Image (cartoon, coloured by chain):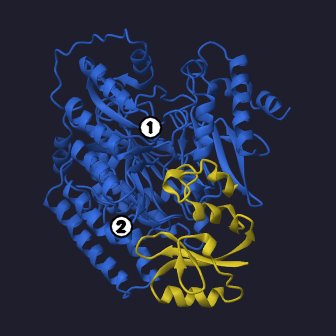
Chain colours: A yellow, B blue
Amino acid sequence: MKILTGNDLKTGAVIWWTGVGWSLDVNESADVGEHGAALVAREEGAQHVVAAYVVDGGKTAEGIRPAHIKERIRALGPTVRLDLTPKASDPAAADWVI
Amino acid sequence: MYKYDEYDQQMVDTRVAEFRDQVRRRLAGDLTEDQFKPLRLQNGLYLQLHAYMLRVAVPYGTLNSAQMTLLGDIADKYDRGYGHFTTRQNIQYNWIKLEDTPDILAELAKVEMHAIQTSGNCIRNISSDQYAGAAADEIVDPRPYAELLRQWSSFHPEFLVLPRKFKIAVIASETDRAAMRLHDIGIKMVKNDAGEIGARFYAGGGMGRTPMIAPLIREFVPLDQLITFSEACLRVYNRYGRRDNKYKARIKILVHELGRDEYVRQVEEEFAHLLTQPIEPPLAELERIKAHFVDPGFDANASDDLDLTDPDFRLWVERNTHAHKQAGYVIATVSLKPVGGIPGDATADQIRLMAKLAKDYSFDELRVTHAQNIVFPHVRKADLYTVWQALDEAGLSTANLDTVGDIIACPGLDYCSLANARSIPVAQKISERFGSAQRQAEIGELKLKISGCINACGHHHAGHIGILGVDKKGLENYQLLFGGSEGADTSLAKIIGPGFTEDGVVDAIEKATEVYLANKQGEERFLDTYRRIGMDPFKEAIYG
């Protein structure tokens, strides 16, 4: 699948395109198929997102998994500060990015 | 330390107001990201993996306690309770909101700080020896010259759009503690045969994808020509540095391609031309600046006695303190490298505590080191145990300066959008593997530096052992390098062979230390033994 991601203009937070809006949760990502470039142009023009781009990903039993480690770290947060990530209570959360 | 005059303050305040308006227009949709990006970068605001990152300049690494306190307060108020001290003696915040940035910059301006020229193709923060003004081995305090260069390079209209970023370091000791020759321009303050102070210039050094050691450009530049000669060096670079290829745009490539002699010829020609134009500030300006850097009121009767009966304190004194020029005082380094910790990170509370200790016990001064530690430059020996106890309670008493545990590491792929691999987890694993004080003492001085990409923010080229993280078909892979040094014996590390996994590189380093200990002669450091026996015994042990 093709996933559209970027950073929130105001906060800089990593966000994922859900098909109707933006989410902080990679698991809510929509498959943008071949529409990525058009969505990037439209959404950046709307001034809600910056540095938007399309990445490869796939659906797994654990949820949506971006193909590249860099995007998985963006999805999780810093692996060395899990307390600052949505999975603060899971000490093995960093294993997901590897 | 230097205090802003009305011009300094007005420049910074004006820039804050200007950026506030730019942020307002960006949030209102009046500026596109393409229009806004160069504006935010000129104010130190990057967009990194997880959020905006703000890099705040700490000129030549010198801070007072009010500034340090504010750095802690910003971490609490606008970030997530911590800051990251960098290899350029700056501090970075990793979780900044765009809309908060003007307020942060306004608060910084109140304590004479800013984030100007911490990004972009301009002259960046001038770095220096963290022991400046305190070290027994310096011929003069290098900071007034660094400050003069800071003022010259701030908003210099000719050098705001250079071919590439430009980094200058100034030192004044035989011992180079600032990686001086790995800068675009390295300046060493020296005395000539007549006993006059002047500047020895090196140019064309740097790390990154093409590491170079800066060659000597001029043996002695008189103080009343310091800015003129700097201007000549920059002008030749600005004129001929490559703008067509980002990867060949640094001055090191120009000096290398022209050849050192031709670069020098052109600089001298430009210098002669510039001497006909009165661009040099009067020496009175240098004297005005120097007046800000006079020695604090040392107690001439301070005792040299130190009670070392507490073994943990003794270890810390032996490892983390340095001789001071004034009897009865020491320079104390606070390691930001606890076992298993994140190199360079400090919590808001820790930052404020260090500020308070500096106010109470170090004449209100702190330094940030390029090795990502903090220095109290002037601590009375009689106060040292009290300082250490306070640090110990706050988890800041790790006694590992310049050992295998004192690792320089860039933020790597955990934070940085340019990185190819994570640096911090590798540093943490090495730190834990070599965590015992006994082990570190046995190995002695071993400077280990980790970068998460070829840009080398973690100085891996200059590590006795360097580690470079790369992306190998989507997997993190770590190349190992040996033999680098950033000191007076500057050398560039060489890759020893095929790369490793994260765990593999930790094992390889352990094998390397075993080879060192088996071959060490006398007081040799790891680097000395490596230089004497060469790479082969290490490769044999590591690759079998």
The residue tagged 1 is: B336
Among numbered discs 2 and 1, the one appearing first in the sequence = 2
Quarter of the image where one finds residue B171:
top left
Residue shown at 29%/26% (left/top)? Answer: B387
| Label 1: element kind | loop
Q: Position of residue B265 (x, y in %)?
A: 49, 56
As drawn, the residue found furthest toward the right would be B544
The answer for which chain carries disc 2 is B
The residue tagged 2 is: B43
Answer left or right for A78 relative to B483. left
Residue shown at 60%/56% (left/top)? Answer: B413
Quarter of the image where one finds residue B92:
bottom left
* Viewer can see residue A36: yes
Q: Position of residue B192 (x, y in %)?
A: 35, 34
From the image, which quarter does the N terminus of chain B lie in? Answer: top left
Judge the density around disc 2: few (<14), some (14-19), many (≥20) Cα neighbours within 10 Å.
many
